[in-house]
Amino acid sequence: MMTRLALISLVCLSFASAHRLDEYLQATTISLQKDRVQAQIRLTPGVAVYSSVMALIDTDRDGAISSEEERGYARRVLDDLSLTVDGDHPKLKLVSTTFPEVGAIKEGLGEIQIDFAADVGGHRFERRLVFENHHQAPIASYLVNCLIPSDPDIRVTRQNRNFGQSVYQLDYLQRGSQSSSTYAAWLAGVGGLMVAWLAIWTTTRACRDRSSLSA
Amino acid sequence: MLAGTAAAQTATARIVAAANTFLSTLDEKQRKSVVFAFDDDKQRVRWSNLPVRMVPRAGLSMGELSGSQRSAALALLSSALSRRGFEKVQQIVDGDEVLKGNEGNNPMFGKDLFYLSILGTPSEKNPWMLQFGGHHLALNITIAGEQGILTPSLTAAQPALYTLNGKTIRPLGQENDKAFALLAALDETQKKQAILNYRVADLVLGPGQDGKTIQPEGLKASAMNDKQRGMLLDVISEWAGIAHDSAAAARMAEIKAGIGETWFAWSGPTTATPGHNGSAYYRIQGPNLVIEYAPQKLGGDPTMHVHTIYRDPTNDYGRKFTAK
């Protein structure tokens, strides 16, 4: 009995010093592209909140996480997120999920990774993205950041967050949006057709002129 | 980065000699355990802030070495670091031993659980890598001829203040004190820009976040005066200065060249009890630099538990030196 008690207290001491405890860390990184927003959310439940988080994941209560439960939980997380770009609400699409071993989650070490994306239309030069995370708010500790855009046509101008980082507003400038590229391609196409028509017309007319001369 | 100076060449030669001396003390089995291929990317990224029982490391642990082997290992580490850098590393390791004692001799912690590994063959010309780490410590040192880099590296401390042999030790005390001094030196307008209006609960670019660069925030150093910029460089030197002196000097020159484009951001209390670490998070981010200092709620008192990360987004693991 004493050994068991000692073991329990040893485990608690270890948890106290090295593991995440009573919060559910949720770190999101957002990556901007011209017509798409990609994001990754990394979720790490603390030891003390393991049971409540696991109850949401392991819906059949068998102690394991099936791929169906992984997808189900990922969808549940996405349902608690909100993304607006220029006032529109693009649909969040699940890209991939990575789940750690149950044992790692139990120890406060397991990091669940969910990748998602949204197609964003429009052709504004000045854009505003608002991201909100309300997943498990009472126990959550949120982080949200934007990666420096790899596309030189996109430049972040302003970031705003509320104190708890559950609401994030990102203003950015976007040159050469898809709409303007499409327009440019359309113009190029029309121009090409006109040149082709002009070439055919010139050739036909030259042939007609030669025929008239021969006659 | 190491400059192409005679001093730098001497430093690389010294490290290579120390590495070969260490390797010569090992038997065949130990040597196989400690040496990895230079292109072993799995080993390259096998580091963490967590204890080795939770995130296993590879290589040879200090606990597996004999007295003479351990001395040779420490001599190798010392050759790659500055005097203060080596002292800081020893203080982090000693802190873990103190933590072990504070937690009823918990086998999860302690100075025997720090691992050394070598990727590639120690060479004065060809690239190779030296790693040393365990709980709260990860040094990734890439050496390529006369060049070398200490990023990414993680330094952390728990307890952040302890007494050993009658001496009060704060392994990351200067990182804390110099940053608080810089914040205090800012005027109200600058503070308004530097202090973020939100809480940052943890490192953003910690272990596993290689290759990411986030949008910078806070106060740009171009909006600081010369004295404040000097203080910022002094804070940075606490990480850059872990490497041996000539490497640190070259790295600081590189950082200084980009200081105007470097940002300083702060989140949390603006004062701390003298002689103690504070509970505020801060980040320094420049063209070739990311530093984060993040007090941890884990274990109760955030002033007694801090994690930090030091990166060069353009050259982590010496990628700039080894790119073909």
Image (cartoon, rainbow, N blue to C red):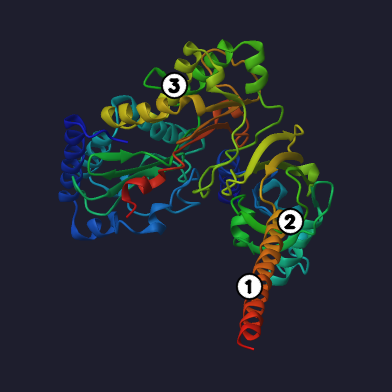
Residue B98 lies in quadrant: top left
Q: Is residue B244 visible?
A: yes
Count of picture labels: 3
A127 lies left or right of B112: right
| Front disc: 2 or 1 | 1
Give x and y (percent) for residue B114: 37, 44
Provide the residue designation for mark 1. A199
B141 lies left or right of A60: left
Provide the residue designation for mark 3. B233
Provide the residue designation for mark 2. A179
Disc 1 residue type (three-letter): Ala
Give x and y (percent) for residue B315: 40, 43
Residue at 36% in and 46% down:
B320
Give x and y (percent) for residue A88: 84, 51
Residue at 19% in and 60% down:
B28
Residue at 59% in and 62% down:
A101
Front residue of A197 and B112: A197
Callout 3: residue from which chain? B
Labels 3 and 1 share a subunit: no
Q: Do tag 3 and tag 1 residues touch (Cβ < 8 Å)?
A: no
B92 lies left or right of B143: right
A32 lies left or right of B246: right
Residue density around tag 3, few if under 14, some if 14–19, many if 20 or more, within 10 Å: some
Residue A92 lies in quadrant: bottom right
Callout 2: residue from which chain? A
Q: For the residues marked 3 and 1, what is the alpha-carbon distance in whole angstroms?
A: 67 Å
Disc 3 residue type (three-letter): Leu
